[in-house]
Image (spheres, grey):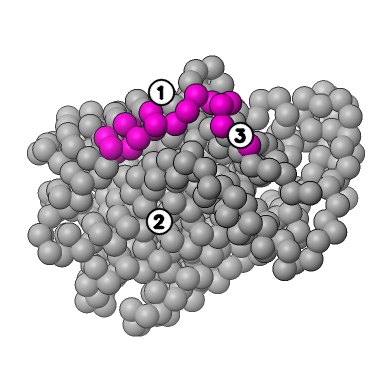
Amino acid sequence: MFSASLARWMAARDLHYGWVVAATTFLTMLATAGAMGSAGVMIQPLHQEFGWDIADISSAMAVRLVLFGLFGPFAAAFMNHFGVRQVVATALALIVFGIVASFFMTEVWQLLLLWGVVLGIGTGMTALVLGATVAARWFTQRRGLVVGLLTASNATGQLVFLPLLAALTEAYGWRTALAFTVAVIALAMVLVLALMRDYPADVGLPAYGDTAVSAPPRQDHSLLATLASPLLVLREATASPVFWVLFGTFFVCGLSTNGLIQTHWISICGDFGMAAVTAAGTLAVIGVFDFVGTIFAGWLSDRYDNRFLLFWFYGLRGLSLIYLSMSGFSALELSIFAVFYGLDWVATVPPTVKLAAENFGREKAGLVFGWVFAGHQLGAATAAFGAGYLRSDFDTYMPALQIAGLMCLLASVSVLLLRRPGTAAPLPQAG
């Protein structure tokens, strides 16, 4: 087996194979981020080619975001039952099918089925839960850094793909742009099949930072029990006010990022006469600063009270969105927004993951965070549809920006309702 041979070769040079798995996961999440972000460059071309209303197109994108979030907890259960490698490879194949089939669509319901349902499920199985699972299994030390890096892959996906996809769409059409995305995802699938392994023990290694090889946990329960486990954890978690604060604030996180800016940014800038390529370039700048900000947020989350980190992250994001809505979208104003908003794009993820682990215990933290992330995507879906609706109704996106900014300020205050980490009892362990 190639991975076992590579792991032995690396071990002889004091290198851990976990970094290969982390890099493969990074590239996979980067590729799927490109698939998610490509929706932003499709809204106007689909509107122009088929005459579909922007609100209808946004509805399909909203369904995709809902399923992207709701499949997170079940993706974690599938990974426990079938293995990370098989689940990720299947998800990538599903994404490729959905994109290729969309080349031939002619009706809005086909957009809803392919970009809403098929891509929603496929990308949902490679969401942040994948990064959290890989970090937990392969790293005892440097876990916070790995979570930050894998979270930042979303920003890198925008940085690498969106300007190029916008340029390809403008020059050759949206189908050519999506064909490039398919090629990148297919490459990621090859790497997953060749390099991804479920546990360090599969290549005879301990987790990074451990000294002894730990046997993978036995999966004695049935598939039905595996599917039921996220629901049982949800029932237990909802009894805690901490869960609802994290769920609600992460709802606002999705509403103010993926659903609004990532989905509608090119259209927002288009209202001010900005070309799609230029708008995508601005979003890429946001991605650059997000990459730095997310890794820095992971570093901070290991050292400071995560409640106060979230207070500042949400508060500054809200102010930046309100500032944007009152700006004239000049180059200077967009540059200021890109820096401050970019540093904050997903900086909320590491502190939220840490708070979930501190309040609910390490064993169930992954599934609890999966449900919190579902709240994130429900918020994203709300913004994806709501911003499109407001744009159609008011002929401007400015109300959507202002509402998102005010919601961020509310989330900033809500985080302070959380008790000091460690004072909440963890969920009871299943016996």
Query: Residue at (76%, 60%) from the top-left corner?
Result: 82
Left or right, 210 with reference to 285: right
Amino acid at pointer 3: Ala
Quadrant in which residue 249 is drawn: top left
Side of 370 relative to 222 (left or right): left
Residue at position x 89%, y 29% in the image: 212
Give the number of the disc on residue 9.
none
Q: Circle 1 sits on which residue? A: 308
Residue at which label 3 appears:
425
Tell me the element at label 2: helix
Dot 3: within a 10 Å radius of its alpha carbon, few (fewer than 14), some, or many (20 or more) residues? few
* Quarter of the image where one finds residue 393: bottom left
Residue type indicated by callout 1: Phe
> Which residue type carries mark 2?
Leu
Q: Which mark is residue 378?
A: 2
Q: Is 212 left, or right, of 223 in this rendering?
A: right
Q: Which residues are magenta?
A: 408-426
Residues at circles 2 and 3 in contact by the CB criterion of under 8 Å: no
